[in-house]
Amino acid sequence: MLGDVTQTTESAAARDEDRPADRTPSRGPSRLRIHRAWIVAVVTFVTIIGGAAFNSLPGLLIDPLHTEFGWSRGEIGLAVSIDMALYGLTAPFAAALMDRFGIRRVVVVALTTVAAGAFASVWMTASWQLMIYWGLLVGLGTGSMALAFSATVTNRWFVARRGLVTGILTAAGASGQLIFLPLCAWIVEEHGWRPASVTVALAALVVVPFVWLLMRDHPADVGLAPYGGAYVEKPAPARGAAARTVRVLVDAARTGPFWLLAGTFAICGASTNGLIRTHFVPSAHDHGMPITAAASLLAVIGVFDIIGTVFSGWLTDRFDARRLLAVYYALRGISLLFLPMLMAPTVHPPMVFFIVFYGLDWVATVPPTLALCREQYGEDSAIVFGWVLASHQVGAALVAFLGGVARDVFGSYDMVWYASGALCATAALMALVIRRKAEPVVAAR
């Protein structure tokens, strides 16, 4: 899987006729080598891990910020919801900007923006500043490195193994969560929330030179064909990125599958980022569990998320993506209905079982959702998926805010868990009625 055999000298020479004149033809006998696409995939994986540092922190800040500044959980949840909403709404425009300016430039600017927002938050004294620094700046920056980034890399660099690569890159977010959640939880508990904010800012800055030196925008930049495909020239930069993004949305919105995919993915975001990632730690803390223990459980979710997402990518290459989605959402909904009964001051076996089960299902929905976008919308699938991801984050934003409000009003999160379980059952039914279509329905341009 991690290698491919080079063409013979004759076939390489024939292919070089279609390359720019300054490309050096391949020479020598055929030999086994690693395709450059896998190096680009590794760089993408590491970049997403760096961005995941920011997604690990909001749930850990709710109690410290409430204690230090007296801000309500609803206020803090609003800042988190702005972050999540912008994360999603930025994604489709980021995909178009990558077509216009290149992947490297967009990602470097995004990493720098999120680092600036995290650093600035160290000096905040009012809740509106939290909304600007973590809501606006971090939201815009992380949105530019959202799953549309993975989709763009996968579509450009891979023809074969797309489902598997999608699963691996999606799992990068869980890998970052595995690394940063326990670390940030320990820093928050031992040294306060400010050093934790500085830590995640530095994590983003460390990734910048790695991206600039090793990332390439297109296989033609290094004279290669995509992995498993034929050589194609690098297209000219696409102008009018914002207009194209809106036009793709308008065209996709005329089709039924778009609304079903957007609706199911909104529920996915509500039941993962908006609910578990934001409110699991404070909910467990309400029942007497230490913050570090609750954060460690979220990190364990990350471990099994990696396994589940990669396996889901493998399954997506082989089975009906609609049925996979229906199974994933149904199982997730059932597990959420049991969660209120599992909360306790200590970690016990039923809670561990929930964590493992939920981790396997966390973002297993991404590979089949992206596969359906690619099937339905072809060349514009990365931008369409960006809009579908926007719905994911809008769902997450609503629950991040409403979950905090529910905690302020009812004194517990139980109603939120039950409502999210019911929503997941609805998503399972929606997935089953998506119509499959062999040809793209949205014009390329």
Image (tube, rainbow, N blue to C red):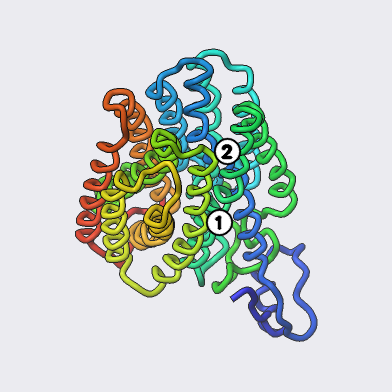
Q: Quadrant of residue 436?
A: bottom left
> Within 10 Å of the Cα at label 2, are there few (<14), some (14-19), or many (20+) other Cα atoms?
many
Q: Please name the residue shown 27% across and 66% down the image.
A: 323
Q: Quadrant of the N terminus?
A: bottom right
Name the residue type under label 2.
Answer: Ala
Viewer-side label of 1, 2? 2
In the depicted view, which residue is nearer to us: 415 or 204? 415
* Nearer-N-terminus badge (1/2): 1
User: On the rendered structure, is 265 left or right of 100?
Assistant: left
* Residue at image location 52% in from the left, 44% down from the top: 293
Q: Which residue is mark 1?
A: 153
Q: Position of residue 324 (x, y in %)?
A: 32, 65
Classify mark 1: helix, strand or loop.
Answer: helix
Which residue is painted at 69% across and 72% down in the image?
A: 34
Q: Amino acid at mark 1?
A: Val
Q: Which residue matches tag 2?
A: 185
Q: CA distance from mark 1 to mark 2?
A: 32 Å
Asked if 19 appears above or below 408 in the picture, the reply is below
Q: Can you tell which quarter of the image residue 138 is in?
A: top right
Q: Is residue 193 above or below residue 166?
A: above
Q: Which mark is residue 428?
A: none
Left or right side of 398 for 151: right
Indicate left or right for 291 with 21 as reference. Answer: left
> Is residue 179 shown to the viewer in this render?
yes
Residue drawn at 44 percent across, 63 percent down: 308
Q: Position of residue 103 (x, y in %)?
A: 60, 48
